[in-house]
Amino acid sequence: MSSPSFTVGIVGATGATGQELLRLLQQRNFPVATLRLFASARSAGKTVEFGGKTVVIEEAKPGVFGDVDVAFFATEGAITKALAPDAVQAGCLVIDKSSAYRMDPAVPLVIPEINPQELRQHHGIIANPNCSTAVALMALWPLHQAFGLKRYLAATYQSVSGTGTDAIDELEAQVRAHVAGTPITKKVYPYQIAFNAIPQVDSFGADGYTGEETKMRQESRRIMGLPNLPVSATCVRVPVVQAHSVAINAEFERPVSVEAARAAIAAFAGAELVDDPANKRYPTPLDFTRQVKCGVGRIRIDTALENGLSLWVSGDNLWKGAALNALQNAELMAREGWLKPKAIAAA
């Protein structure tokens, strides 16, 4: 008996994450019977080539999900809040990359290498983690399993693609303007991003932490099942097009060693060990752009924390931090029989 195929929707198909989803659906041969693409009204009517066919983009609005089995929401939280309930009511599984439902206790927040069992607890919506959280946890989870994570501190180096295609365009335009000696304009970020670093990702809260920094703390606790885990993060936007990096200082319950840490990383499905300082080998965002795994290196004993490790991780924010993680969740559900086409589910 052949495996079922699905009617797949992408909400936000013209954005950076939506474009990566299209690429990944083809590369990973997800069983797509029919593809439905949704975007804003101004993008409706445009066409995209997929699997040798031309797909017309439709306006994302209530009432369009009647035949969709699974919809990847690759858009902002406000749009998810407006449309996801309608999709769920139509019997469509929503896998959402925004922060709209991440902290809702009724909605699973899932990284499949860490807490796949949560996928079975959904009520129509599955949340994707924040991109910087996902990349950081690809290093921290195997170390937690080996040594017992007690706390961690993080400084992120986040690419502009995390803000969207307009931010990529702004970085490229500013670089060209610098080379040409013409005035540099700013629209997306409050400061010039080319040749700069901006220590603000998201808006500031009353405690002085940005939304991105708060997300790393809250989401790490939820995904890892450590509700009281101390986490402190400083999130920084840097002039890199794609893939985030995170410098991590982590303290553990049990004694650590570099050798055991390397072995734990090397054995973990979500990570690739790249740690040979003598030969200047360590992960970089360029090397881990459009890579399934996140690279982990610069592993060393932390000199300020008891039972501590310092390390560096790079991973694609549009892949593991968004599109790939969402698709991996759908793949796992389809493989386990937890996701069924509507026609089969109703039979």
Image (cartoon, rainbow, N blue to C red):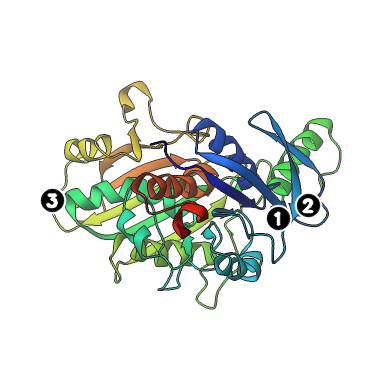
Q: Position of residue 327 (x, y in %)?
A: 48, 45
Q: Which residue is mark 1?
A: 189
Residue bearing the label numbered 2: 186
- Tell me how far mark 2 sits from mark 3, CA to CA: 48 Å
Quadrant location, the N terminus: top left
Question: Relative to the observer, which residue lies in front, 114 or 215?
Answer: 114
Are circles 1 and 2 on residues that touch, CB within 8 Å? Answer: yes
61 displayed left or right of 2: right
Report the amino acid beneath label 3: Pro
Residue 340 in view = yes
Q: Relative to 60, is 121 on the left or the right?
A: left
Q: Residues under labels 1 and 2: Cα distance?
A: 6 Å
Q: Of helix, strand and loop, which one carries label 1? A: loop
Q: Nearer the viewer, residue 99 or 310?
A: 99
| Mark nearer the N terminus (2 vs 3) | 2
Q: Residue at x 26, y 40 (%)?
A: 300
**Residue 279: x and y, percent?**
35, 21
Count the numbered circles shown: 3
Q: Which residue lies under the disc numbered 3?
A: 255
The single residue placed furthest to the left in the displayed view is: 255
**Along the polypeptide, which appears first: circle 1 or circle 3?**
1
Residue farthest bottom in this picture: 206
